[in-house]
Image (tube, rainbow, N blue to C red):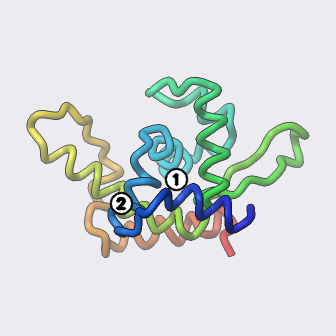
Amino acid sequence: MDDFVKRSIAIRGDITCPIAVAAEVLSDQWAVIVLRDIAFFNQRTFGAILDNSNEKIPRPTLAKRLKRLCDIGLLSARGDVGHAQRKIYSLTEPALGLLPIMVGMAEWSLSQENFKAQKFEFLKDLYSPKSQAMAELIDELRITHAIE
């Protein structure tokens, strides 16, 4: 993807505040859910994400989000040697940097009495951004997603 497209997706108008730029990337519910499903549940194909999402993401929405996440450099896609029309999505290094933020979002939602978030046991060891479990998860994902 060329730099113009990447800049136009990440920065709209005069948005230069780093919080606003992060909000532009993360404010879409479906983008965060797609990243979650790939990172934490190893759903790396369109069909796997579609079939296993509890949130029931619509097919056209999933296609748009996968394309956008690839366009802004959070995912990469490669062909599947076992199936000519299937793509396998991989997290990029910038996406790995979002994992502690996403886990922090989960921790925050669990701390709020007004929300009905379900606890997931596998997240509890990841809550500290400097946790050994988080570092090990990111290292494992670097290998399984072949991030260079």
Query: What is the secondary structure assignment of the residue under circle 1?
Result: helix
**Left or right position of 134 against 140:** left
Q: Residue furthest left?
A: 113
Which amino acid is tagged 1? Ala
**Left or right position of 16 against 56:** left
Residue 33, given in percent of the width and then of the height, sits at: 46, 41
* Mark 1 → mark 2, Cα distance in angstroms: 24 Å
Task: Tell me if residue 100 comes above or below residue 45 in the rendering.
Answer: below
- Could you say which is closer to the camera, residue 140 or residue 62? 62
Residue found 36% across the figure and 63% down from its top: 100
Q: Quadrant of the N terminus?
A: bottom right
Residue 43, given in percent of the width and then of the height, sits at: 60, 42
Residue found 29% across the figure and 52% down from its top: 105
Quadrant hosting residue 115: top left
Can you identify the residue that label 1 sits on?
A: 39
Task: Tell me if residue 27 comes above or below residue 115 in the rendering.
Answer: below
Task: Tell me if residue 31 comes above or below residue 144 in the rendering.
Answer: above
Can you identify the residue that label 2 sits on?
A: 20
CB under 8 Å between callouts 1 and 2? no
Which amino acid is tagged 2? Ala
- Could you say which is closer to the camera, residue 115 or residue 126? 115
Residue found 60% across the figure and 34% down from its top: 62
Query: What is the secondary structure assignment of the residue under circle 2?
Result: helix
* Label 2 crowd (10 A; few <14 / some 14-19 / many >=20): some
Quadrant hosting residue 3: bottom right
Of callouts 1 and 2, the N-terminal one: 2
Q: Which mark is residue 134?
A: none
- Mark 1 or mark 2: which is in front? 2
